Amino acid sequence: QVQVVESGGGLVQAGGSLRLSCTVSGLTFDNYAMGWFRQAPGKEREGVSCIIWSGVSATYVESVEGRFTISRDNAKNTLYLQMNSLKPEDTAMYYCAADRTSGYCSGSWRRPPSFYYWGQGTQVTVSS
């Protein structure tokens, strides 16, 4: 059984930083692309970033480009999201997601159906 568990969320002031972690078990982690998504109250879940199986290539939604960095440690089955220069509009539940068909980020990676396994989320709140 595949388990996806996020951690690292919290309350931070605008301009601050947080590092999210996501540990995956029950899956051959280094075979698949991984993604971070977020969902704010009343809004749809949106893709934040995607990283390929090897970690050498990643893509970001424009609103976080230059502020967030996705990375992975395949030896630890762990995905990370380093978030710097946080803004109040970054406030959301953040979700980790695992593909199960490809090691590469698809052209539709920002759409939730592109990923199969999901965690329960970790809350990030940025105060102004």
Image (tube, rainbow, N blue to C red):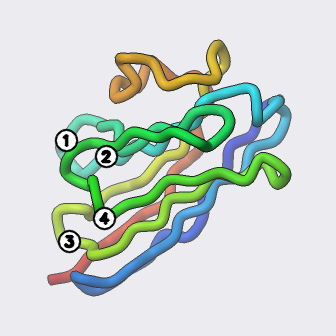
Q: How far, Cα to Cα, is label 1 from label 3?
A: 17 Å
Percent across and percent down for residue 121 are 51, 51
Which of discs 3 and 4 lies nearer the camera? The answer is 4
Can you identify the residue that label 3 sits on?
87
Q: How many marks?
A: 4
Under mark 2, the amino acid is Gln
Do residues under tags 2 and 1 come within 8 Å of each other at their CB atoms? Answer: yes
Can you identify the residue that label 2 sits on?
39
Left or right: residue 34 versus residue 73 is: left
Q: Is residue 55 above or below residue 79?
A: above
Q: Secondary structure at mark 3?
A: loop
Residue visible at 27% across and 76% down in the picture: 85
The answer to which quarter of the image holds residue 99 is: top right
Which of discs 4 and 1 lies nearer the camera? The answer is 4
Residue visible at 14% across and 83% down in the picture: 128
Q: How far, Cα to Cα, is label 2 from label 4?
A: 18 Å
Query: 46 or 30, which lies in front?
Result: 30
Looking at this view, name the residue that lies furthest to the front: 56
| Image mark for residue 43 | 1
Q: Is residue 127 above or below residue 108?
A: below
Under mark 3, the amino acid is Lys
Name the image quarter holding the N terminus: top right
Query: 99 or 124, which lies in front?
Result: 99
Residue visible at 34% across and 29% down in the picture: 110
Left or right: residue 54 versus residue 120 is: right
